[in-house]
Image (cartoon, rainbow, N blue to C red):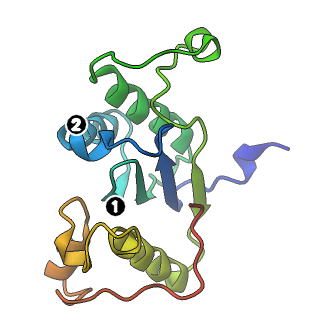
Amino acid sequence: MDYRRIREPGGTYFFTVVLEDRSSTLLTDHIETLRQAFRQTRAAMPFTLEAAVVLPEHLHCIWTLPANDADFPRRWRYIKGTFSRKLPRLDAHSASRVKKGERGIWQRRYWEHLIRNERDLHRHLDYIHYNPVKHGLVSQAREWPYSSFHRFVKQGYYSLDWSDEPDDFDAGE
């Protein structure tokens, strides 16, 4: 199967990306390094970051790619590699990861989903912004600092006290 045919140039995608060690707090401990990796990637390979939430060991985001581009895998490799190279080398390496030039920080795979319509977009936005509450990190979405929730409040999409759990939703976690 040719997966390039499944990818949609200019598409809007939801992603879940997870660290190898699910007990790690690397993403929030090194949030500025992660932000820098996203900025560098967007400068080299543009995309619109529509929404995001960063938790200690995983993140969710929604991107819109340029009209003539569907290459999100290359962007994720760049983000993961840039972030990983900037961290101190404290991790042990498996022979398999050393052979592939990997540090063992990220899970190799990630979840991606092409947003199909407005309803699908709204469900994924709610899922992203509710995620810190779902994981017991805060009691309301507004309390989590590593989220686009605050931007959406400023735009009038959410009220400051919003914290509705999306119904019947599984976004690849």
Q: Between residues 26 and 100, which one lies in front from this camera angle?
A: 26
Relative to 46, does residue 130 appear above or below in the rendering? below
Q: In which image quadrant can residue 152 be found?
A: bottom left
Q: In which image quadrant can residue 159 be found?
A: bottom left
Q: Position of residue 42 (x, y in %)?
A: 32, 41
Residue placed under numbered mark 2 in the picture: 36
Amino acid found under the numbered disc labelled 2:
Gln
Q: Which residue does the image show at 47% across and 45% down from the upper left?
A: 22
Residue furthest out toward the right:
1
Q: Quadrant of the N terminus?
A: top right
- Of labels 1 and 2, earlier in sequence is 2
Q: In which image quadrant can residue 112 be found?
A: bottom right
Please tell me whether mark 1 sits on a helix, a strand or a loop.
strand
Q: Between residues 104 and 21, which one lies in front from this camera angle?
A: 21
Amino acid found under the numbered disc labelled 1:
Ala
Q: Position of residue 86 (x, y in %)?
A: 27, 23
